[in-house]
Image: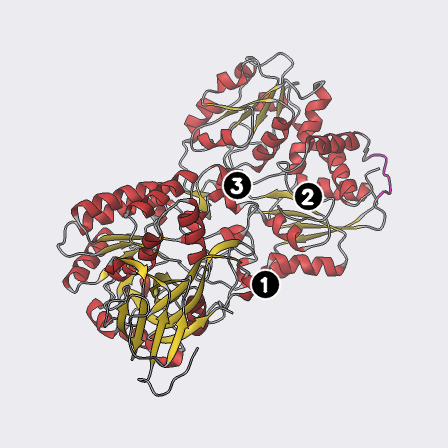
């Protein structure tokens, strides 16, 4: 990068790239000038006058608003042997994510304004923007609602009991009603746990073959269906369906969206890439919740990603230590890492195989998720917005090696996968926080 | 696929038909009454995380008949109680000098985990609801004592198939030899998906249909310990699915009745059926020893 100290401080010119900014309906060659952590100017190639402290040559590359991940587990407080905010956000940066929303199912559960504030302290060493999602009920026990208002004031962008569902009808209705009053989204891990006890994968031929108890698609769909009905009862209620994995649940989301635009949903890269057959011979790196589903569920998800039903791609990055995963399949914890493989899988599977346009894929990583939690000033590179930028090469072929992951844990099903599409630089508030060698 | 040490036996599903025939042939040459010191000095560890009578003792007698030393490790009274992981237990047994591990575990895939990390043969003696390969082999051995060949036979498998590792292994084995397999049981114990397990598998909810004209009837115990959440009225089950002498008459005249045990008289079968001349239930137990001798001989490289 060229240095020129005479120009205004803290400025960076991203030159020669193809800007894809779905919210601004831009897909064209554009230069981007950022200054003071904000977007200063967007202009056609070589039209930006004056210099910048630094220049980034983005020729042949895509310049996009910084990616936003609505669903990560950073394991702090309390489970630093799996991940820390520092290591998890380093993995996020390497995956092109400039903002991550972290789940509250830590130890202890993030159910108080104090813990929300603690997560946001600079001492945590976050390399990208960190947006806490707070617990919906005390200790996520599903009984007594937390103080949404105080949690929101402390910086929580949504509330959830993720890892488990809010099952009680009254509690879920109350959560949606209180959320509506202060414009806070309720994120639901949709699983009727009364029907999935002892289950470790999707119900179907593979589960039968392996002698494993299977989670039926209906255990997800029934909760989504109920929640959509509840959301319709309260004007302004915001329901976000986390890691949606079944065709039937999509039907409920579609119905909800027709009458209620604030029903949103996210899909993970592993659910649009893999099916339950991939569990193979009890590989616990293919064990997560919701589980990998059938081919027809994946087909429905691919359609919904293309047609706009899905609002965001979220990783559900869920790191676990090796010794925790190297146990009997049924005893292994649910969850896989996902931050560093998300874009490669999206380009490889959605763009190259499914022919979904790049602008739609970028939307799923940027303006889509920004809208879900109302992350103001993010998800688009409009002038004055935060200078969060992701620069990637959609044609670059590379091999993901788990051993080189920046995450503290290596529990990925994609070790050794050849992917197309690689993040080359991640910029947060005008600062380059990641650059590919 | 799991890269297991040569001689491991994790499942029937991934065994080729010729390997199965070779094991059965070897089993016919094994005689527990005429000990052969094929495995002299070898150490076989029996690692049992679940109660077992016939499988454990027959593996033990099979090992000793071949001259091997055996040690029994059970979950109670070992470091497993103190929280040692399966893998660490495996490493420990290997370090102590185990030449092979025979493992019985309540969780499916446990033998695969051991096999993926150890350089000694691992023999699956039953893992959760998954497979019970030695049982399927001894059942095939037993059938072949009474029928010329497996091909073209009709076998009815009746009862709690969903929870049964015996059923899964038997279905895989019989399917590889062109047996017509009819599964029979109520939906709670026999989901429709069962027919996807292998080729040549049909399903019926009517015992009479399953039994009519069949060569072999394989009965299964209702696995109360794995029934979590399943609601079955025992009286209804008995009325519809109990094998009685009257129902047995629908089968071929030379049909045989099999059961992996333990049998519950008065539930899946009547006492008269258990004790009738067509019942080979005791033979199966007896045949377990030479079959497991063959499995151990193959595991420890003394198959010839």
Q: Chain of mark 2?
A: B
Residue A3 % position (x, y):
41, 83
Q: Look at the image and say whether residue A375 sits in the magenta stretch.
A: no
Query: Mark 1 near mark 2, Cβ–Cβ under 8 Å?
Result: no
Query: Mark 2 near mark 3, Cβ–Cβ under 8 Å?
Result: no
Local packing at callout 3 (Cα closer than 10 Å; few below 14, some 14-19, many 20+) is many
Q: Look at the image and say whether residue B36 sits in the magenta stretch.
A: yes
Circle 1 sits in a helix, a strand or a loop, which is it?
helix
> Does the rendering let one see residue B224?
no
Quote the CA–CA distance across marks 1 and 3: 27 Å
Circle 3 sits in a helix, a strand or a loop, which is it?
loop
Residue B17 % position (x, y):
69, 30
Q: Chain of mark 3?
A: A
Q: Which residues are magenta?
A: B33-38
Provide the residue designation for mark 1.
Answer: B82
Which residue is drawn at the image coordinates 84% and 37% (left, top)?
B304
Pick the front one: A108 or B228: A108
Q: Which mark is residue A211?
A: 3
Q: Which mark is residue B56?
A: 2
Q: Chain of mark 1?
A: B
Local packing at callout 2 (Cα closer than 10 Å; few below 14, some 14-19, many 20+) is some
Instruction: Work out whether B114 lies above or below A45.
Output: above
- The mark nearer the N terminus, 1 or 2, is 2
> Does the rendering let one see residue A162?
yes
Quote the CA–CA distance across marks 1 and 2: 23 Å
Q: Nearer the viewer, mark 1 or mark 3?
A: 3
Instruction: Work out whether B53 lies above or below B287.
Output: below
């Amino acid at each position: 990068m060229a240095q020129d100290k005479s120009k205004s401080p803290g400025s960076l010119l991203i030159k020669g790239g193809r800007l894809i900014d779905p919210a601004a309906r831009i897909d064209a060659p554009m230069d981007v000038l950022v200054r003071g952590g904000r977007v200063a100017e967007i202009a056609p190639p070589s039209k930006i006058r004056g210099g910048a402290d630094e220049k980034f040559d983005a020729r042949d590359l895509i310049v996009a608003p910084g990616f936003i991940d609505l669903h990560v587990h950073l394991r702090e407080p309390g489970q630093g042997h799996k991940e820390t905010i520092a290591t998890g956000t380093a993995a996020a940066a390497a995956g092109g994510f400039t903002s991550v929303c972290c789940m509250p199912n830590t130890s202890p559960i993030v159910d108080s304004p104090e813990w929300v504030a603690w997560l946001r302290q600079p001492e945590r060493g976050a390399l990208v923007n960190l947006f806490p999602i707070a617990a919906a009920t005390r200790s996520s026990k599903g009984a007594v609602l937390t103080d949404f208002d105080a949690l929101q004031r402390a910086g929580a962008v949504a509330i959830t009991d993720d890892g488990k569902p809010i099952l009680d009808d009254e509690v879920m209705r109350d959560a949606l009603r209180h959320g509506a009053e202060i414009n806070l989204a309720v994120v639901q891990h949709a699983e009727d746990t009364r029907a999935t006890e002892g289950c470790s994968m999707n119900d179907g031929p593979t589960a039968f073959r392996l002698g494993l108890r299977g989670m039926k698609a209906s255990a997800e769909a029934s909760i989504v269906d109920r929640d959509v009905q509840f959301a319709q009862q309260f004007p302004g209620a915001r329901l976000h369906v986390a890691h949606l994995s079944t065709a039937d649940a999509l039907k409920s989301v579609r119905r909800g969206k027709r009458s209620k635009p604030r029903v949103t949903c996210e899909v993970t890269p592993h659910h649009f890439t893999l099916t339950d057959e991939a569990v193979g011979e009890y590989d616990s790196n293919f064990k997560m919740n919701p589980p990998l589903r059938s081919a027809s569920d994946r087909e429905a998800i691919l359609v919904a990603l293309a047609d706009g039903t899905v609002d965001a791609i979220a990783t559900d990055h869920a790191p676990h230590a090796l010794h925790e995963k190297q146990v009997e399949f049924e005893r292994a914890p649910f969850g896989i890492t996902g931050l560093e493989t998300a874009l490669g899988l999206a380009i490889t599977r959605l763009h190259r195989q499914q022919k979904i346009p790049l602008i739609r894929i970028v939307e799923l990583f940027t303006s889509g998720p920004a809208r879900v939690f109302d992350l103001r000033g993010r998800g688009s590179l409009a002038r004055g917005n935060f200078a969060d930028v992701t620069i990637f090469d959609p044609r670059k072929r590379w091999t993901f090696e788990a051993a080189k992951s920046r995450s503290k844990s290596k529990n990925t099903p994609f070790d050794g996968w050849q992917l197309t599409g690689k993040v080359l630089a991640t910029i947060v508030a005008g600062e380059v926080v990641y650059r590919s060698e | 696929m799991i890269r297991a040490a040569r001689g491991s036996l994790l499942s029937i599903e991934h065994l080729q038909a010729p390997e199965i025939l070779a094991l059965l042939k070897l089993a016919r040459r094994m005689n527990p009454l005429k000990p052969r010191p094929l495995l002299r000095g070898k150490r076989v560890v029996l690692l049992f995380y679940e109660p077992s009578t016939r499988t454990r003792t027959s593996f033990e007698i099979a090992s000793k008949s071949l001259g091997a030393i055996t040690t029994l490790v059970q979950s109670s009274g070992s470091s497993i109680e103190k929280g040692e992981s399966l893998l660490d237990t495996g490493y420990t047994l290997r370090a102590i000098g185990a030449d092979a591990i025979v493992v019985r575990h309540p969780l499916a895939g446990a033998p695969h985990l051991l096999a993926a990390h150890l350089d000694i043969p691992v023999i699956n003696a039953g893992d959760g609801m998954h497979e019970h390969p030695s049982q399927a082999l001894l059942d095939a051995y037993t059938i072949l004592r009474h029928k010329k060949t497996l091909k073209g036979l009709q076998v009815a498998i009746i009862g709690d198939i969903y929870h049964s590792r015996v059923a899964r292994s038997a279905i895989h084995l019989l399917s590889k030899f062109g047996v017509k397999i009819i599964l029979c049981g109520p939906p709670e114990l026999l989901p429709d998906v069962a027919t996807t397990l292998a080729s040549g598998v049909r399903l019926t909810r009517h015992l009479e249909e399953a039994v009519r004209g069949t060569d072999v009837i394989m009965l299964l115990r209702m696995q109360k310990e794995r029934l979590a959440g399943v609601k079955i009225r025992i009286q209804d089950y008995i009325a519809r699915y109990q094998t009685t002498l009257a129902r047995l008459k629908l089968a071929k005249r030379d049909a045989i009745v099999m059961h992996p045990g333990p049998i519950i008289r008065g539930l899946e079968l009547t006492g008269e059926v258990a004790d009738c001349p067509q019942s080979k239930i005791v033979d199966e137990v007896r045949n377990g020893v030479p079959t497991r001798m063959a499995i151990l001989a193959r595991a420890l490289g003394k198959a010839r």
